[in-house]
Image (cartoon, grey):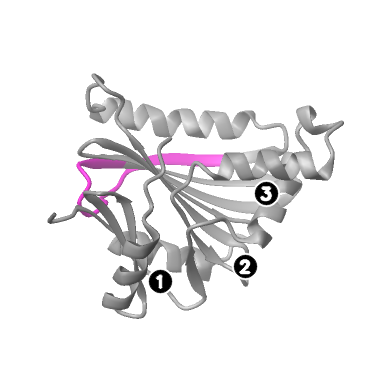
Amino acid sequence: MIRFVFLFALAMSLLLLPATAAEIVISEDLLVEIPLSEGWALHLEPPEALVKEMAGHVAHEPAAANASAAQIEKVTRKRMAANEAFVYHAASGAHLDIDFSPLEQGASAPSTKTLQTSAEYAAQSLEGEEDVSNVVWEVIPVKIRGAREAFQLVADYQQHDLPVKFVGTIGYVEGYWFFLYFTDPGQSPEVFEQMQQMLGKLVVRHSDH
């Protein structure tokens, strides 16, 4: 997945936007604007605390049985590098991973059914993870401002016997698939409500230039 985040443009955008909002430059002509509730911060690279947490999950995978801590961290960072940005809540460890993937050359834009099926596949993939249990999920259509269409996977489950809330939004905006994956390892109702409010105001738009 291609990563087009321009640091200078982002810095300038942050200066121009209200203090509670952030702008992410996905490509030369595509932007994401998201409000930030108190306690949330935008990161272009995964926060170290988040890397450590995710590495802990990777360490439980069978393939990591004989891997060193450094090797596990390398794999973790490689996986997380697919994302353009992270919105992180340090107090709870909750995070929104933002990933835009350009449509492959010659490929058609996904249909409504394709988007819905992709969200359902994500749920089935979650159910198939060895360290995940008691998965309860549903897929619903959702409105993302500026996007053509999107579906949302809302799931509650246990990972390593700890409760987790997951909200995965899969959608399409002209020329791009996008994936907005929210994970709350504590299932905090307040944190979930804050994220729902932020997603409700998130805007995907093509720039003017």
Residue 36 is marked as 1
User: Quick check: is 181 in the magenta stretch?
Assistant: no
58 to the left or right of 184: right
Q: Read off the magenta span.
A: 136-150
| Of 201 and 103, the residue lying toward us | 103
Cα–Cα gap, marks 2 and 3: 14 Å
Residue 54 is marked as 3
Q: Residue at x 79, y 28 (%)?
A: 62
Q: Which residue is mark 2?
A: 92
| Of 159 and 41, the residue lying toward us | 41
Quarter of the image that includes the N terminus = top left
Q: Find residue 48 and report its horizontal and vertical position in percent.
A: 66, 60
Farthest top residue in view: 106
> Could you tell me the amino acid type at mark 2?
Ser
Residue 61 image-quadrant placement: top right
Q: Find residue 166 and report its horizontal and vertical position in percent.
A: 53, 49
Question: As displayed, is residue 30 above or below residue 113?
Answer: below
Quarter of the image that includes the C terminus = bottom left
Contact, CB < 8 Å: mark 2 with mark 3? no
Contact, CB < 8 Å: mark 1 with mark 2? no
Q: Callout 2 environment at 10 Å: few (<14), some (14 to 19), or many (20+)?
A: some
Q: Callout 1 environment at 10 Å: few (<14), some (14 to 19), or many (20+)?
A: many
